[in-house]
Image (spheres, rainbow, N blue to C red):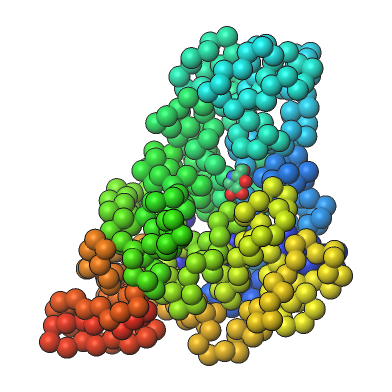
């Protein structure tokens, strides 16, 4: 396990929307290079960059046309290499986004694969043997190529599924086993892409839909086998590089598949979503909502056993949000978000901050969809830097912008948040700094123990090494019996009282105490 992960806080950058350095209305790699010092000043020492490869952008770049070429709109391969280099000089790491499950239907592999004349790429994707064969349990596109067969897609219709084989073969006439030479060739092609960027200096990958490789693989054993093999290659040739999976099943991803980190995703009703984004029939039942209707045990019941089972293998990564889900501004007020972020950044594992969350950027409802974003588009708007033109994102005319900037009068920006002592920006900076200064206890590896978490009750209190953390997102005072001697109050939002073996946390409060 690369040691650097012990003290890492990631920053996720959506390249389209971070900083436009050449005035064409869209973010670019040079823009990211220019803002590295900013990312570092927030306290983050690593970046996950969403896909920046050549693509027709039917799914914002998750539909890759050429894995080895940076999309022109972001710059050149040399720019990306320079980003690796400058980041390394500043002590920062860069993860690229690896999309192993599918390509764009304009990728040259697919163009060859759909050719009716059999060739090296005929089995690179999953095809039935005849255009009249389309078993309904598979997501197939039917009758749209000259090749006599239908092909499986992995996500949108423009994203044909790469062929890593089938674990259980139910249609032997067209399903290949995982050890078929053509499926093994897909694995080799994936390794080749990884090596290409790792050799140029990237520090690893966030892996898109990591569990989607092998089909008819309910328990994901065959998919895990492929990743274990890839991990072997990394341990041998790139021992400092890391992989984080979009999977949300730590036992499978960390223990069985060999990922270094796994995202705790926003699956509806799971522990993560019920903490921060749980709207049921219009009512906010998130634990962090001020109305106090949440249930923290949905989180602890899931998280604690997973943490225990995988502690020696890898990290569970919690995030403030990402490019696929509404920012927390959608349902939580500013204080609630401060408490939520303080909690995320005092949890074990390797946390991720989504660009703009640190300044309280809004989730922009009702935007016209861009590049397959649909409801996700509202979380992908340009970063808000200054109070000037286009909020400092770009000097282009407004109608040339990739997406509109937040037009509200009081739109938060780095400039106005920096100067406000109690801004969410300063809270995020403070809590990340405290986490990193006390890395042994509060960093990725430190212990985690629940002190108080009860069904439908507040507060939530937990211990990390020599620290106790208490958070009360509800709008009422909340007390618990508390017998622990406190040496120092390290950080607090709102008030608390500690007397007669009772800890009382005021409405919407957070406290980090040293014992
Ligand atoms: C997950 C990515 O985060 C999302 O943005 C993308 O659309 C799908 N995977 C398909 O690649």
Front-most of residues 513 and 297: 297
Q: Is residue 467 visible?
A: no
Residue 314 image offset from top left, x and y in percent: 40, 51
Extreme-top residue of the structure: 173
Q: Is residue 484 above or below residue 224?
A: below
Residue 426 image offset from top left, x and y in percent: 52, 83
Q: Quadrant of residue 67?
A: top right
Q: Is residue 415 above or below residue 188?
A: below
Q: Quadrant of residue 209?
A: top right
Front-most of residues 141 and 82: 141
Residue 336 image offset from top left, x and y in percent: 44, 74
Q: Is residue 137 above or below residue 474?
A: above
**Residue drawn at point x = 62 percent, y = 54 percent:** 375
Tally of marks = 0
Front-most of residues 265 and 261: 265
Q: Is residue 291 left or right of residue 211?
A: left
**Residue drawn at point x = 55 percent, y = 56 percent:** 325
**Residue drawn at point x = 60 percent, y = 65 percent:** 363
Q: Is residue 303 left or right of residue 321?
A: left
Q: Is residue 215 left or right of residue 130?
A: left
Residue 53 image offset from top left, x and y in percent: 73, 48
């Amino acid at each position: 396990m690369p040691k650097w992960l012990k003290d890492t806080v990631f920053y996720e950058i959506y390249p389209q929307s971070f900083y436009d350095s050449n005035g064409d209305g869209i973010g670019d790699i040079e823009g990211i290079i220019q803002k590295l010092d900013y990312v570092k000043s927030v306290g983050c020492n690593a970046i996950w960059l969403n896909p920046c490869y050549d693509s027709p952008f039917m799914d914002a770049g998750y539909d890759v046309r050429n894995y080895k070429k940076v999309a022109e709109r972001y710059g050149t391969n040399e720019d990306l290499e320079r980003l690796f280099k400058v980041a390394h000089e500043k002590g920062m790491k860069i993860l690229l986004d690896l999309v192993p499950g599918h390509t764009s239907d304009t990728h040259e592999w697919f163009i060859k694969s759909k050719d009716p004349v059999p060739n090296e790429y005929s089995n690179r994707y999953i095809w039935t043997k005849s255009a009249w064969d389309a078993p309904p349990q598979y997501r197939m596109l039917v009758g749209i190529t000259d090749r006599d067969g239908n092909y499986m897609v992995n996500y949108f219709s423009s994203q044909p599924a790469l062929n890593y084989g089938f674990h259980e073969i139910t249609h032997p006439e067209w399903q290949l086993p995982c050890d078929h030479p053509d499926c093994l060739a897909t694995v080799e092609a994936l390794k080749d892409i990884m090596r290409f960027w790792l050799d140029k200096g990237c520090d690893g990958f966030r892996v898109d839909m990591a569990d989607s490789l092998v089909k008819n693989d309910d328990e994901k054993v065959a998919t895990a086998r492929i990743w274990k093999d890839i991990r072997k290659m990394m341990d041998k040739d790139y021992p400092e590089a890391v992989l984080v999976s979009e999977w949300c099943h730590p036992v499978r991803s960390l223990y069985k598949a060999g990922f270094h980190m796994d995202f705790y995703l926003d699956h509806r009703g799971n522990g993560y979503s019920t903490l921060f984004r749980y709207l049921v029939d219009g009512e906010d039942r998130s634990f962090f909502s001020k109305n106090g209707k949440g249930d923290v045990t949905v989180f602890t019941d899931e998280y604690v056993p997973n943490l225990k089972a995988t502690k020696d293998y890898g990290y569970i990564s919690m995030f403030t949000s990402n490019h696929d889900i509404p920012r927390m501004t959608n349902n939580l007020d500013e204080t609630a978000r401060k408490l939520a972020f303080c909690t995320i950044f005092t949890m074990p594992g390797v946390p991720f901050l989504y660009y703009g969350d640190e300044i309280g950027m809004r989730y922009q409802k009702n935007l016209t969809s861009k590049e397959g974003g649909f409801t996700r588009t509202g979380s992908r708007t340009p970063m808000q830097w200054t109070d000037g033109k286009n909020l400092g994102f770009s000097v282009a005319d407004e109608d040339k912008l990739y997406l509109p900037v937040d037009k509200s009068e009081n739109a938060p920006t780095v400039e106005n948040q920096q100067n406000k002592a109690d801004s969410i920006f300063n809270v995020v900076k403070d809590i990340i700094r405290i986490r990193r200064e006390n890395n042994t206890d509060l960093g990725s590896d430190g212990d985690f123990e629940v002190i108080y978490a009860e069904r439908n009750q507040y507060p939530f209190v937990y211990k990390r090494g020599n620290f106790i953390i208490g958070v009360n997102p509800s709008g009422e005072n909340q007390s618990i019996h508390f017998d622990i001697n406190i040496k120092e109050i390290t950080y607090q939002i709102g008030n608390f009282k500690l007397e007669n073996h009772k800890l009382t946390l005021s409405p919407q409060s957070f406290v980090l105490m040293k014992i």
